[in-house]
Image (cartoon, rainbow, N blue to C red):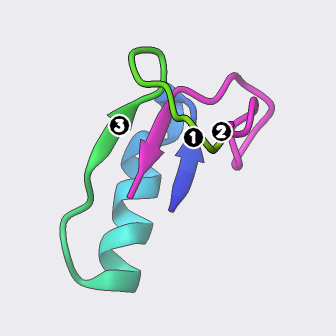
Amino acid sequence: MYVVCKDHVELAIDMFVDEFEDAPDVVDLEHTKFIDWDPPVKCQECEHEARFLIV
């Protein structure tokens, strides 16, 4: 699972495919809310706002 900004979506997808050898689901965090989990606020690759969840 990767939480990234718009600039790092392609990188996160590539890392997911390399690790799991399968296509990920891309979830837009701006339009999705979770009951029991608060996603990180910042991208795991930089300091920008986290926008996408790659799972």
Q: State which tag comes first along the sequence, 1 or 2.
A: 1
The residue sitting at 26% across, 60% down in the picture is: 24
Above or below, 52 against 3 in this view is: above
Q: Amino acid at mark 3?
A: Val
Q: Earlier in the sequence, mark 3 or mark 1?
A: 1
| Proximity of marks 3 and 1: CB atoms separated by less than 8 Å | no
Q: Is residue 39 magenta?
A: yes
Give the structural element (helix, strand or loop) at label 2.
loop
Q: Which mark is residue 27?
A: 3
Q: Which residues are magenta?
A: 38-55
- Image location of residue 40, percent across then percent down: 73, 39
**Label annotation for residue 4:** 1
Q: Residue furthest left?
A: 23
Q: For the residues carrying marks 3 and 1, which lies nearer the camera in this image?
A: 3
**Residue 5: image location, x then y, percent:** 56, 31
Whether 50 is among the magenta residues is: yes
- At label 1, the amino acid type is Val
Secondary structure found at label 1? strand
As drawn, is 35 to the left or to the right of 24? right
Q: Is residue 41 above or below residue 9?
A: above
| Closer to the camera in the image, 28 or 5 | 28
- 46 to 20, vertically: above or below: above
Does residue 14 lie above or below 12 as drawn?
below
What amino acid type should be assigned to the residue bearing mark 2? Pro
Residue carrying label 2: 39
Residue mark closest to the camera, 1 vs 2? 2
